[in-house]
Amino acid sequence: MPQNKVILGSEEWFSFPDLGIPTIKARVDSGAKTSALHAINIAPFIKDEKNWVKFDINPIQNDLKTIIHCEAPLVDKRIVKSSSGYREQRYVIQTTLDIGTASWTIEMTLTNRDSMGFRMLLGREAMSGRVLVDPEQLFLLGQASSDKLSEIYQNSVIPSSGLRVGLLASNPELYSNKRIMEAGEMRGHEMHFLNIKECYMKLDATKPEIHYRGGKILNQFDAVIPRIRPSITFYGCALTRQFEALKVFCLNSSTAITQSRDKLFSLQLLLNHGIEIPTTGFANSPLDTDDLIKMVGGPPLIVKLLEGTQGKGVVLAETKKAAESVINAFKSLNANILVQEFIKEANGKDIRCFVIDGKVVAAIQREALPGEFRANIHLGGTASIIKVTSEEKKIAIKAAKAMDLKVAGVDIIRSSKGPLLLEVNSSPGLEGIEGATNKDIAGEMIKAIEKNIKQK
């Protein structure tokens, strides 16, 4: 009967007593089948010989200093494909939901909802037989004011730990940059976004300085996280060097970033450390194109621009004629290129290992779109969780160490000869790997800063 059902608006405040969440704003969405709760730092564990999961939640939207530590029975794991193409494995919990004076048990998936407008979504499975929705109404069960929220969550605010951290990058709206800023704030640090193009410096033997727009002097930073786009590597690394001159800890050094951006030099460096790569050729002249093609085993082969990024400037030449045409075309433009053997058995897949401070903190398999050989997420590739072998982990760690990078995205391909290293990225993106693994990679980067500053 309708009179026995709870009437809800399209937005309401609910509570989860078993999770210790006194109130949280939710989107009521009968178009969604399952309910979802914002969660980070998700980790399964065993409790009383049963499967449980623990996680953290920022219950108030746009407030990263308020955090609740939760745990709940784990009832399932599901693969969910997002609208952006990421295949994400989500843990499913069971807990008690309080709606006004009513209460019942529901299932919810756990996922990072930082990019969404609500910390929770109530789906129709949780509402079935119990709820009627009036989509024109809001907060029929009452509204929580800012003062009320501050009072409710006053014991859940993280105290500041006093570190002043700058994120040296170009786009504050980029997912990776937003997540790093949020992760630092969540751990109680004072975070500053420093736009590379708005920084300038004073070179002085006794008093070097970095200035920001309006003449503000950037001083008293404890750490800087360089996230430098390839197109501004020169200037970004110059700024990073200036911070280093000011004795500021940089999560990746200017030297490490510079050498990682030189594809030819980085491959030579990796080979000198005993790390296997696909057979690669490099030449300054197109006169010996035929021998260059033979050198890498003949077609099909890959031609790469040394300055290319995110899969751009990478061409698959399937025949000798096509290879000659591509090589000669690039050379006529005075472009520096690498010619590399094509690993057919990889079938458009590679592995991205995310290395932080000498440890593989997460790994995903990236798979190219049908008919495409490049698995880059920016080109429409999909990401999924993969269990990497101990040998692949060793390669990733060894590669990051060879490049002297504290943070690195190491790309590995599986071949008939064993794992081969493709590339080492000094500013790896977080969206694909966080979405697929549900791991707080940005938080691990902040922890690395805390650890290194403590050791200094």
Image (tube, rainbow, N blue to C red):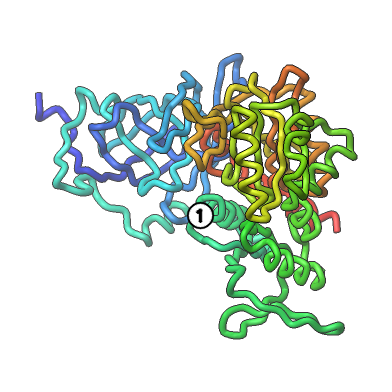
Rendered position, 271 above or below 126: below
The answer to which of 234 and 212 lies nearer the viewer is 234
Which residue was labeled with disc 1? 174
Q: Is residue 106 visible?
A: yes
Rendered position, 374 above or below 50: below
Q: Residue at x 50, y 22 (%)?
A: 74
Left or right of 263, for residue 185: left
How far from the left and from the top, in percent, is residue 33? 30, 27
Q: Is residue 443 visible?
A: no
Q: Residue at x 80, y 73 (%)?
A: 246
The image quarter in which residue 283 lies = top right
Q: Amino acid at mark 1?
A: Leu
Q: Residue at x 16, y 42 (%)?
A: 135
Q: Rate crowding at label 1 as few (under 14), some (14 to 19) or many (20 or more) other CA atoms within 10 Å.
A: few
Element assignment for label 1: loop
Left or right of 259, for residue 38: left
